[in-house]
Image (tube, rainbow, N blue to C red):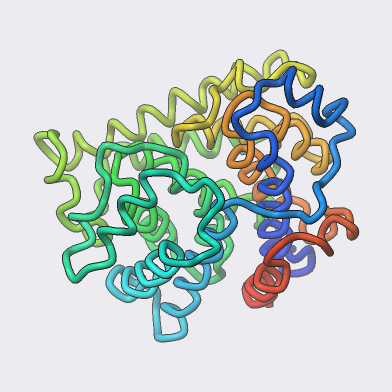
Amino acid sequence: MTSGRNTKRAATGSLIGLALGDALGFPTEFNDVPSILAKCGPWREMELIKPAIVSDDTQMTLALGNGIRMAMDRGVLAPVGMERPVRKEFVDWYHSPDNNRAPGRTCLTACALLDSDGPWQEASQIGSKGCGANMRVAPVGLVPGLSVEQRSGAAQLQSALTHGHPTALAASDLTARAVYLLAHGADPTGLVGQLRSYAFENRSHYNERWLGDLWRHSQDPTPEAFISRGWDDCLTALDRVVKALRSPSPETDPCLDTGEGWIAEEAMATGLLCFLLFPDEPVLALRRAACTEGDSDSIACLAGAFAGAHLGAEAWPKEWEERIEYRSELLSLGALWDA
């Protein structure tokens, strides 16, 4: 891999791409493709709404990013040092008057429970593998200087604060891994293979240092049995991406190949597919992702994170970037991590 992430400003590109995808897909969420086409015209010509309002996906990405920044201002990123500020950021988001963008029930339930003195594991919704954790995890893949263990642990911990299902943990880990690899110059054509290898390597590894006794809140007999369920779901989803790319069909709704994205492994897979259909045409990747029957803002959010990590800050039209909501906060975090 090359070391050109700083010159291309991968963190800025990924964060802006994530928000642009979110804003493009927010108005089309809950619509089927014929309804989207009737409302927006041909998908290849979809335009960013004015004003470019984002959903809870971008809001929670910023909450996570700010929490990680505070944790690293105090020292090396570690479980307790990360959990406290990220937990506070999530609770602040929960109480914010701007939290009015159709947030997911799992996030709301967990954040209400996190607003207490109890262990975070008791707040975690261990039955939920909704996409609400991996659509916000990109910052973990963008923060410089983390070890493989730190990146994996941080990705899974941020998921577990709200979505404790093993598939949510594994999908968050894989999404952060994909963002990291692309930011550091990985060839998109080999990306799915690298992710599959990573999943196989980690399939039976339960990261107790970061997750504590979370697995005991499930019905699984061992921590290894708990976590392997999640990796197996994600491996199946990655296999569906591989199959779709053997005979790519850009004009067909990607959800038909990899799922509608309401659950973690499908959001990861469909966001990845949209990016890989157009690895060097980032705006088309966002438009394809936004014109889907499924959770279009989260799918486009992930496609934008991948495309921006791959191509950097220059990937996005200036007139789009200039009107995205939360632009200054996104640019501030991006500049910090690109420095």
Instruction: Tell me which corner region of the image, top left, top right, bottom left or bottom right, holds residue 247.
Output: top right
Q: Residue at position x 77%, y 21% from top? A: 250
Residue located 38% across and 41% down the image:
168
Whole-percent x and y of residue 59? 56, 60
Kindly indicate the quadrant of the structure image that contains residue 338: bottom right
Residue 124 location, x and y as percent? 26, 51
Q: Nearer the viewer, residue 37 or 321?
A: 37
Say whether residue 324 is visible.
yes
Of residues 311 and 127, the one nearer the viewer is 127
Residue 1 seen in the figure: no
Image point 48% across, 46% down: which residue? 134
Say whether residue 98 is left or right of residue 208: right
Q: Residue at x 83, y 54 (%)?
A: 316
Residue most extreme to the bottom: 74
In the displayed structure, 309 sits above or below 115; it is above
Is the residue 68 above or below the residue 229 in the image? below
Question: Residue 151: where, in percent of width, then height?
Answer: 44, 59
- Observer-nearest residue: 93 or 79? 93
